[in-house]
Image (cartoon, rainbow, N blue to C red):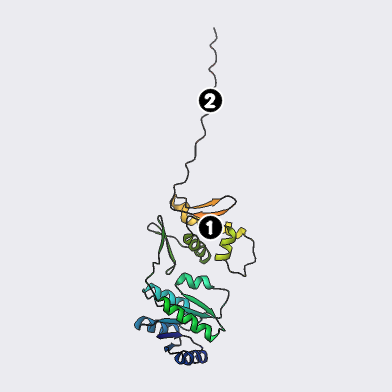
């Protein structure tokens, strides 16, 4: 079983490499993102151990480019970074597992073996609902032929709703899955971002796909035309004046 490890901490990389070799793996090591991407693109591996904070090209960009090229080798992300990105970002870009430093070597080996057992089947990337589509790898959102630019948080919210399309999801579920555990604000932030999304994915196109289910949450469904506004009935005509004799 052949493993590629992309890790710039040379002492850690050498320690893990020697341990994996003792477990029967063949291990190649790259110390920057560009070299790692080149190795992963040119050679066949059973799994890739990919650090987040890499010189020349960070781990997220390496992963994004691998998936863009259609390389579906299982990827286990290794990182000690918190805050700017979280596990959801890694999975959205196509990671298969995630391990935070410092980690147990026995756990690492178990995770690698599990990834290899699952293999790397081709998987659909673009999610489509009606005329709305979202590509988690390129982070491209489109309504028909029109591109829709979204912020990172808007994209995360839309991606979660797309995965749960036609279901009613509560504010609490959205906070748990789109915002990180350190978020201390109120759940009104969900309502604010739902409004942002509506103004970008629905309003400009004259459709209604993101609706509020009162008292329960929100639902993303296929395109619907907005309900027509009923014009008020005309006022009754005043009675005609009687003619004078």
Q: Name the outermost residue toward the left.
A: 42
Element at label 1: helix
Where is residue 169? Give x, y as percent: 54, 57
**Mark 1 Cα-neighbour bin, 10 Å: few <14, some 14–19, many ≥20:** some
Element at label 2: loop
Q: Which residue is mark 2?
A: 236
Where is residue 181? Give x, y as percent: 61, 69
Point 58% across, 58% down: residue: 171
Point 49% across, 61% down: residue: 158
Between discs 1 and 2, the one toward the N terminus: 1
Q: Quadrant of the N terminus?
A: bottom left
Point 52% across, 89% down: residue: 12
Q: Name the outermost residue toward the top.
A: 245
Q: Which residue is mark 1?
A: 196
Q: Is residue 237 above or below residue 75?
A: above
Where is residue 25? Give x, y as percent: 42, 88
Does residue 41 appear in the picture of this structure? Answer: yes
């Amino acid at each position: 079983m052949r493993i590629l490890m992309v890790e710039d901490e040379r002492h850690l990389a050498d320690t893990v490499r020697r341990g994996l070799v003792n477990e029967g793996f063949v291990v190649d090591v790259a110390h920057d993102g560009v070299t790692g991407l080149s190795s992963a693109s040119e050679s066949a591996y059973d799994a890739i151990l990919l650090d987040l904070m890499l010189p020349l090209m960070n781990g997220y960009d390496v992963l994004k480019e691998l998936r863009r090229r259609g390389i579906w080798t299982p990827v286990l992300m290794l990182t000690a970074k918190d805050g700017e990105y979280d596990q959801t970002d890694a999975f959205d870009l196509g990671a298969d597992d995630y391990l935070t430093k410092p980690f147990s070597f026995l756990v690492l080996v178990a995770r690698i073996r599990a990834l290899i057992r699952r293999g790397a089947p081709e998987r659909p990337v673009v999610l489509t609902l009606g005329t709305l589509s979202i590509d988690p790898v390129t982070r491209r959102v489109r309504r028909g032929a029109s591109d829709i630019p979204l912020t990172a948080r808007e994209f995360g919210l839309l991606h979660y709703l797309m995965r749960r399309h036609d279901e009613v999801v509560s504010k609490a579920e959205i906070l748990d899955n789109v915002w990180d555990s350190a978020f201390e604000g109120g759940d009104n932030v969900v309502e604010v971002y739902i409004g942002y999304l509506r103004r970008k994915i629905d309003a400009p196109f004259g459709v209604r796909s993101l609706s509020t289910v009162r008292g329960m949450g929100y639902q993303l469904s296929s395109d619907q035309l907005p309900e027509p506004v009923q014009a008020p009935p005309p006022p009754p005509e005043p009675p005609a004046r009687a003619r004078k004799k």
